[in-house]
Amino acid sequence: MATRVSAQPEFGGKVIIAKRSGNVKRRAWITVFAASALFWLVVALSVWCLWE
């Protein structure tokens, strides 16, 4: 038994482009750097606690 999937003729015809400001990119990069710094801080503190 075959299932047929059909779409409306105008489906996918309109493309909506998302407009992003540079502020979103800057916040994303700041978040990436902050998460990375926090990760390495936790690693350094863990090593320091285990070393003692």
Image (spheres, helix red, strand yellow):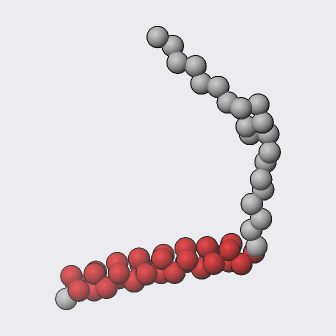
Q: Does 5 sit left or right of 35 as displayed?
A: right
Q: Is residue 32 above or below residue 14?
A: below
- Given residues 44 and 10, the one toward you in this image is 10
- Given residues 52 and 13, the one toward you in this image is 13
Residue 39 % position (x, y) = 41, 77
Residue 19 % position (x, y) = 77, 65
Q: Does 44 sit left or right of 51 as displayed?
A: right
Residue reaching furthest to the bottom = 52
Q: Residue at x 46, y 11 (%)?
A: 1
Residue 48 % position (x, y) = 28, 86
Q: Which quadrant would residue 27 be assigned to in this image?
A: bottom right
- Given residues 26 and 16, the one toward you in this image is 16
Q: Is residue 3 above or below residue 14?
A: above
Residue reaching furthest to the front = 8
Q: Residue at x 78, y 56 (%)?
A: 17
Q: Is residue 49 above or below residue 16?
A: below
Q: Does 8 sit left or right of 37 as displayed?
A: right
Q: Which quadrant would residue 20 be assigned to in this image?
A: bottom right
